[in-house]
Image (cartoon, rainbow, N blue to C red):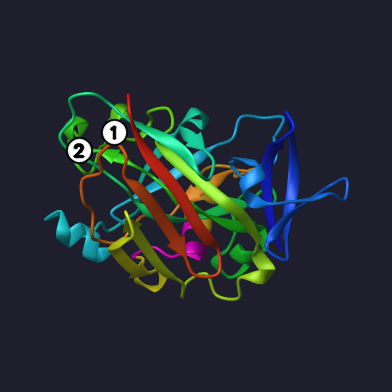
């Protein structure tokens, strides 16, 4: 099932996809265009941990002229970075290069501590799509991205759907694609991750407790171009959804 979180008639609420429309909890059915799309994640009573992988595709590491990492390169993101489908991401004034990153997002479903690789999928609620923008001007180096590269407000659109884990038979064999103004600018497949989803669940849970609602952004393949105000960027993952975002001036 595809789950969404939207605002409609001034009220935030959950919805599901039904026959190309949004089915609200009260039984009403509305068009996609009638909703304000929010990140498709239910509110949690605790702060959400957002873990993100750098250089988790060998072709992307090669593109940036870096050696592929021997263990996960991880950074933490704040919740204020997240926005929904069809929303706008602000490009700071004066920067010379800001690019998209199409990423599969793992949504943790239950408390995970010391999880074995073979049991990892049991701890996943579902998957969604992220576009984790980066601003190269602020980059110290690719192994240690500073806060301004990856933690700016609005820099991480996510959605439109949270797809139940049982509806994604093999998350490690999904095609990814990004278009900018309708032109294909990035393509890849999750099978090319250096550290796959089960490894990441085992790795993180070996030293920290993952809680329901936590997110793992799993990295992006090669093929990044500068995005300017007015550009429409669509990041799409097979079976998960197509996330649309527009670049706006600061």
Q: Is residue 197 magenta?
A: yes
Q: Is residue 169 above or below residue 21?
A: below
Image marks 2 and 1: residues in contact by CB distance under 8 Å: yes
Tell me which numbered mark, 2 or 1, is placed earlier along the sequence: 2
| Quadrant the C terminus occupies | top left
The x, y position of residue 170, in whole percent, is: 55, 75
Residue located 34% across and 51% down the image: 101
**Magenta residue span:** 194-200
Residue 67 visible in rendering: no
Q: Quadrant of residue 89?
A: top left
Name the residue nearer the viewer: 188 or 70: 188
Q: Quadrant of residue 186?
A: bottom left
The x, y position of residue 124, in whole percent, is: 63, 58
The kind of secondary structure element at disc 2 is: helix
Classify 10 Å Cα crowding around label 2: few (below 14), some (14-19), many (20 and above).
some
Q: Quadrant of residue 192?
A: bottom left
Q: Is residue 4 left or right of residue 188?
A: right
The total of numbered circles placed on residues is 2
Q: Is residue 11 left or right of residue 161?
A: right
Q: Is residue 83 magenta?
A: no
Residue 195 visible in rendering: yes
Name the residue nearer the viewer: 25 or 207: 25
Classify 10 Å Cα crowding around label 1: few (below 14), some (14-19), many (20 and above).
some
Residue located 75% across and 39% down the image: 13
Picture disc at residue 149: 1
Picture disc at residue 133: none
Q: Is residue 233 left or right of residue 93?
A: right
| Quadrant the N terminus occupies | bottom right
Distance between the Cα atoms at labels 2 and 1?
A: 7 Å
The kind of secondary structure element at disc 1 is: helix
Picture disc at residue 136: 2
């Amino acid at each position: 099932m595809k789950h969404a979180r939207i605002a409609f008639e001034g009220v935030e609420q959950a919805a599901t996809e039904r026959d190309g429309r949004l089915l609200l909890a009260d039984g009403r059915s509305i068009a996609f265009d009638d909703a304000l799309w929010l990140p498709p994640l239910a509110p949690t009573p605790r702060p959400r941990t957002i873990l993100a992988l750098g250089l988790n595709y060998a072709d992307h590491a090669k593109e940036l002229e870096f050696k592929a990492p021997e263990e996960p390169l991880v950074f933490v993101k704040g919740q204020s970075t997240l926005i929904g489908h069809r929303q706008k991401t602000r490009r700071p004034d004066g920067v010379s290069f800001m690019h998209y990153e199409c990423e599969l997002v793992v949504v943790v479903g239950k408390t995970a501590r010391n999880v074995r690789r073979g049991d990892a999928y049991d701890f996943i609620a579902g998957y969604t799509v992220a576009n984790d923008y980066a601003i190269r001007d602020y980059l110290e180096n690719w192994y240690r991205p500073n806060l301004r590269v990856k933690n700016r407000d609005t820099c991480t659109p996510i959605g439109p759907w949270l797809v139940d884990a049982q509806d994604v038979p093999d998350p490690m064999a999904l095609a990814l694609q990004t278009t900018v103004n309708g032109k294909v600018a990035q393509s890849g497949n999750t099978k090319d991750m250096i550290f796959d989803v089960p490894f990441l669940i085992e790795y993180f849970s070996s030293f920290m407790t993952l809680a329901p609602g936590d997110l793992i952004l799993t990295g992006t393949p090669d093929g990044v171009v500068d995005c300017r105000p007015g550009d429409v960027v669509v990041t799409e993952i097979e079976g998960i959804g197509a996330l649309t975002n527009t670049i706006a001036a600061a």
